[in-house]
Amino acid sequence: MTKDLRKAEFRTSDGIVLERVYGPTADDSADFRDRIGLPGEFPFTRGADPEMYRRAFWIMGMYSGAGNAEETNKRFRYLLSQGQTGFSIALDLPTQMGYDPDDPKARGEVGKIGVSLASLEDFELLFDGIPLEDIRQIRTTANAISPLFAAMVIAMARRKGIDPGNIKLFLQNDVLKEYVARGTYIYPPGPSLKHSVDVIEYCASNGLENWTPMSVAGYHIRDSGATPAQELAFCLANAMAYFREAKSRGIEADRFAQNIWMFLAGDINLLEEVAKFRCARRIWAKLMRDRFGARIPETQALKIFCYTLGGRLTAQQPLNNIARVAIMTLGAVLGGVQTLATSSYDEAYSTPTEESAAIALRIQQIVAHESGVADIVDALGGSWAVEALTDQLEDRVMAMLSDVEERGGAVACIESGYFQREISGAAYRHQCEVDSAERVVVGVNAFEAPEKTKIHLYRPDPEIEQRQVARIRALRKRRNQGAVESALAALEAVARSGGNTIDSTVACVEAYATTGEICATLRRVWGRYEDRIVF
Amino acid sequence: MKYAPLFGVCGAVTKIALYSEGAGVGQRIRVLLAKPGLDGHDRGVKVIARALVDAGVEVIYTGLHRSPEQIVRAAVDEDVDLVGLSILSGAHSALVNEIMNLMRDSGLAAIPVVVGGTIPEDDRAELADMGVAAVLGPGDPMREAVRLVKQLARPH
C-alpha cells in the first residue's frame, strides 16, 4: 500500500473493497453481452425498457398527505398544478394500524404523519374534484391495511361511476417488511401474508391491470440500517414468500408479476446505487424466469420505484440535504428507475412544507430537463467499475438469499428475529463509524456550523384530531347500524374460512363500517402481533 | 460485545433486559427505553440501547407500540433510574405530557426522562416545561446519550 493515501482501504456502503482503477477482466469476453443484455431484454440489467426516458421521463411523485382529507385534498390540487404526475397518499399511524380516531391508542397521532382515513366518507372527501383517471400513479403507504385501502378505492369508484380498473392505483401492500422494519403491522405474519396476496388474487381475477397490487419494499429495511445487499436480499426473500402463496392459489407469475414493483431506497453512494438498481433487475429476471416460471418479458422485467433515503438526510445544516438529494436522484436515474420520489430537505424533522416539497420536485425536473443523463439509456453500462460493482453486489445478494432460504424463508426469518438482528447489527456498526468520524457526514461530524439553521417546519393543525373524532362519531350515528353489523359478520365468516377477503371488505366499506371496526373484526380472527425484540 | 438478554413480562410489557457482562451488579444504572404510541421506527432506540449496554448501563427495552400506562407501569416495576422515550411520529407533545403526568401520579417525579427522536427545536421548551430533562435529536452521537444517562441517572 502506498503510504500517502487518504485511507488504508476504500469501501462502498456494503463494504465492497474498491480497486484503485477498474479495467477489463478475464470474463469480459463473448458472454459479457449475454450477462448484461440490452435495455428491454433479458436479464434487464440495462433497463426494463429499450427506450427508457427517451420515451417518457420517470414518474415524479412525492410523499404527501397530512392532516385530514380536506387538507390533503388541497395539497394534491396544488402539487398537480405544479406539474407533478403522480402522488402518494401518506396515511397517519392510527389508520395504518387499524384504529379509529377516537380509539385511546390513537391519541395524539391523528393526522400527524399522514391523512386520517377512517371511513369511505374521508376517502370521498380526499378525492373530491381530483381527475382520478388522468393521474399517472396514485400510491399509498398502506400495508397491513392495503386490502382495506383497495376496497375503499373500489367502493369510491363504483359510487362515482368510474371503472376501478381505470384508476392507476399503486399499493405498497408489503406487510412482511413491516415486521422487519417500520413496525406498522396488525396481525401475525402468517395470516397477513395471505391477506396481502388477497389483493394480488383479486386484481388477477378481476382484470385490474392498471393496478399495482404490491410493491415489495427494500426501502424501509435499508432505512432501518441494512446494507444495500441486505436491502435487496431481504426484500427479495419477502417477494418470494408472496409469490409462493400466489402460486399455491393457482395464480401463475405471468398473470400478475408484470404489475408487481420493487420499492428501493436511493442512497448517496452514487456508483454503488447505480449498480444496485442494475443488479436488482438482473436477479429479479432470473428468479422470475427460473423459479416462478415467468415466460413473458413483462413479468421478468422489474419496475422500480425509488425514494431517496430519508435516513441519510441530516437535521444539521438542512439545506445541504438539497445537494444530497440531487446526488441520490442522479443515482436513481442512471440506475433506470420508473418512479422517483425525492425527499424534502426538512425530512429529518417532519413531513414537508409546500415550499420544501416543491424544491424536492425541482431537483427531479433539473435532472430530467437540464442534466442530459436521461437522454442515453444506461449511460454507465459497460463502465468497468459499475459492472464490477453490479456483479459483486449480485453475488452478495444471492448468497444472503440462499442463506434465508436455508433458514426456512422470509416468515421463518421474521419469527426467529433473524432479519431484525442482522439489520440492527448493521445499524449499530454504521453509527459507530459515524461517531468515530471514520465515516464523514458533512455538518454532523465534520464541517459543523456554530449556528443552527432555522427552517420553517410543517405543523399539522392541532384541531384535526377533535374534528376527526367528531366526524367518525357522527357517522356512526347516521349510518344503518344493522347493515354495518351484517357486513362485518360476513367478513368475519370469510376470514375464518380462509377465503379471499376483498369482496366482503368492499361490502363493509360501502356500509360505512370504519377502518377500526374492519380491522378489529380481522384481529378477532387472526390475532394481534407483538414484536419480537432482538438486538 | 456480549449481551445477556432476559425476556420476561412486566406491566403487560414484553421486555428485554440487556447487560454487558462484567459490570458490577448493584451500582449499575438501570434505564427503561420505551417506544410510546404507534410509531414503529426503532433503529434509533436499538442503537442507543446497544451503546448504553456497551457503556455498562442495564437497559430494559419495551418494544414497539406501548401506551403511556404500560410504560409507567414498567418504570415502576423495574425500579429504573431513568426513562428514555423514542418518538419519531410527531406525536411527542401529547404522549410525553401524558407519561409525565402518570409518572408524577406514580411517585416517579424524581426519575429523569430523556426524549429522543425528531423533536423540532421549537418544541424543546415545551417538553422542558413538562419536566423532560433532555432531548436527543437526529445526528447526536451515541456518546452524548451515554453521557446524559450517566450524568442524569442516580442509581438507587
Image: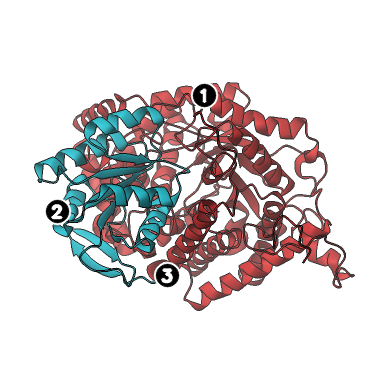
Chain colours: A red, B cyan
Does residue A206 appear left or right of residue B144 in this picture? Answer: right
Does residue A289 appear left or right of residue A32 in this picture? Answer: left
Q: Which residue is mark 1?
A: A354
Looking at the image, which is closer to me, B77 or A170? B77
Within 10 angstroms of label 2, few (less than 14), some, or many (20 or more) residues? some
Disc 3 on helix, strand or loop?
loop
Q: Do the residues bearing badges 3 and 1 touch, measured as CB atoms within 8 Å?
A: no
Which of label 3 and label 1 is nearer to you? 3
Within 10 angstroms of label 1, few (less than 14), some, or many (20 or more) residues? some
Disc 2 on helix, strand or loop?
helix
Q: Chain of mark 1?
A: A
Which badge, 3 or 2, comes first in the chain's sequence? 3
Q: Residue at x 35, y 32 (%)?
A: A111
Residue A422 lies, in percent from the top left, at 48, 66
Which of label 3 and label 2 is nearer to you? 3
Task: Name, please, the residue furthest toward the bottom.
Answer: A406
Residue A211 lies, in percent from the top left, at 55, 45
Residue A347, can we see it?
yes
Does residue A440 appear left or right of residue A148 in this picture? Answer: right
Amino acid beneath label 1: Glu
**Figure quadrant of residue A254:** bottom right
Residue A107, can we see it?
no
How far apart in space, not on screen, are marks 3 and 1 (Cα)? 46 Å
Amino acid beneath label 2: Val
**Figure quadrant of residue B68:** top left
Q: Chain of mark 3?
A: B
Q: Which residue is mark 3?
A: B1
Q: Residue at x 37, y 44 (%)?
A: A96
How far apart in space, not on screen, are marks 3 and 2 (Cα)? 29 Å
- Check if mark 2 and mark 1 are on a common chain: no
Q: Which residue is mark 2?
A: B76
